[in-house]
Amino acid sequence: MGLLKDKAAPGREDRLEACMAYGGTACGLGKENRSCLKNQERGFSQSGLCVALPTLGMLLTLPDTAVVVHGAIGCGSTGFGMNINIRLRHVQRGYTNAKDSFWVSTNLTESEVIHGGEAKLEQTIDEIYQRVKPKSIIVLQTCTPSIIGDDLASVVSRAREKLDIPVLAAYCEGFKTKVWATGYDVAFHAIVHGFIESDKEGRPSRKDGWKPGERPLVNVINLASVGQPDEEEMIRLLDAIGIEVNIGPNFASRETIRNMTQADLTVSVCPTHDDYFIEYLYEEYGIPYVLKDMPIGLANTREWLLDIAGHFGLEKQAEALIKEEEAKVLKAVEKFRPALEGKKVYLSAGEFRALVTGILYQELGMEVVGVRAYHHDHFGRDFYGKLLDGQEGKDFTVDIANFQPFELVNLLKKIKPDLYIGHVGDNVWAAKLGLPVVTIFRIFDYYVGYRGFYEVAKKTVRILRNYSFNAKLALHTKQAYKQDWYEENPFKFIRSSEVSAANTTANQPDAGARKGAASNE
């Protein structure tokens, strides 16, 4: 990986051979050649998620930090939508005087695009330091300054020499990668170089390893989207088997992040999110890791706990805890099963989250009829097989799509699920079709572990019993697409990028095809 040697994080197309376009079935996905998947793309794309969104979403969580978005003013707009969640998460963690997440834009104009934006960036960093007095400053470089050749590394180097706080650089040019999840790597890259390796205190020295009889220290890599209830559930479970927990780097102080180099084990909550940082801690500090499961649902929580316990000889304690917790929660959800069993569910989210949530719903007696994953890489590959095993090989539709709502509504019209599970900003498409909708996570709710299993079941039953608002919304809302689009193959725009130049035109959708997906508004 060369995290310390590379100036910027590589795109996941290269690092993980990630795929952004596939339409078919779970069985078909397992038979596809990975290199072919990597090179598939869409001849028509309605929307997409820029790498800047997850990068900004992570970096804005750092306490007392100012983010400078270097580029056009619109590139920071996603910060508005993240602000309320980030502020509430700080309050949940005990920061009673939490303020709004703070970001500014250098607002490059035509003049800077021609003459360069370095001077304006330096002026912005100095002014933010004087006016806000943050404990750290992060410069997030977007497409425009990269294209015109602004030297971010030199600007940040000069700022580090001048100021008495960490100054971080995040290279977040959206044109360099189509895989939005690269944004996680960009944020981790900035945190490592700015908080750990380039800190004026010097590089942390590795402590002596864990010894039997001691309470081991385990890093739990948290997601910006994981709320305080879920963090408390993971701490509760690990503490019950004798493990001390260090949670970060999201919402964590610089001291907490630096202390992650002293752990005895690093544990992932989501492999898609965490692998770049986990590999760094292993390669540079020799910290072993668990990078397999997401503790959602009974089977995955069981595997997650046993994998962690196995590193410290705590398997008996873990097995006793699992037996007790499963017995309690299975008894508690028994009253919900009649309302859930046999219902068909469609899931849409980041790949790993969607797949493990599908397994949770199978454990509640429901059938997965479709998954829309925002991208695909090897971390999710085995879990499609687990979903198939969970319903005795009954196949389901898979759409690998960076949003693309025109494909989603087509699929939902054809599949007609009983329930739709998705992200809050994406659920409107299913709601407008009259489907009951469950938001896949909220920072106020339990979602992981055994408490999460119970709360998801309880919430799902409540929504299935009363979704009259969505039903009425469908009756009084104009559909976004013309009727003839719903009669088309939803995957007709997916093609291989390896077609020859002579065949490119022939493979492009014609005017009639484009019209078929045209907006009706």
Image (cartoon, rainbow, N blue to C red):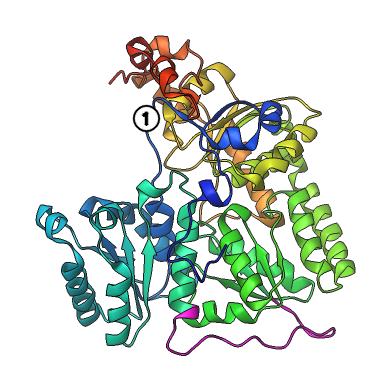
Q: Residue at x 77, y 42 (%)?
A: 334
Q: Residue furthest right?
A: 316
Q: Is residue 457 above or below residue 509?
A: below
* Among the 4 quarters of the image, the one containing residue 462: top right
Decide if residue 228 is in sight here: yes
* Among the 4 quarters of the image, the one containing residue 405: top left
* Among the 4 quarters of the image, the one containing residue 204: bottom right
Q: Is residue 104 left or right of residue 12?
A: left
| Residue 198 highlighted magenta (yes or no) | yes
The percent position of residue 285, horizontal first and vertical second, equals 64, 78
Residue stretch in magenta: 196-217
Q: Residue at x 9, y 56 (%)?
A: 111
Q: Nearer the viewer, residue 119 or 136?
A: 119
Q: Nearer the viewer, residue 87 or 355?
A: 355
Kind of residue indicated by mark 1: Gln
Q: Nearer the viewer, residue 196 or 448?
A: 196
The percent position of residue 445, horizontal first and vertical second, equals 56, 54
Q: Is residue 362 left or right of residue 515?
A: right
Q: Is residue 499 above or below residue 151?
A: above
Which residue is label 1 attached to?
Answer: 46
| Residue 333 highlighted magenta (yes or no) | no
Q: Is residue 89 above or below residue 148?
A: below
Secondary structure predominantly adopted by residues drawn in magenta: loop
- 10 Å crowding of disc 1: few (<14), some (14-19), many (20+): few
The percent position of residue 279, horizontal first and vertical second, equals 62, 65
Q: Is residue 402 above or below residue 86?
A: above
Q: Is residue 89 left or right of residue 385?
A: left
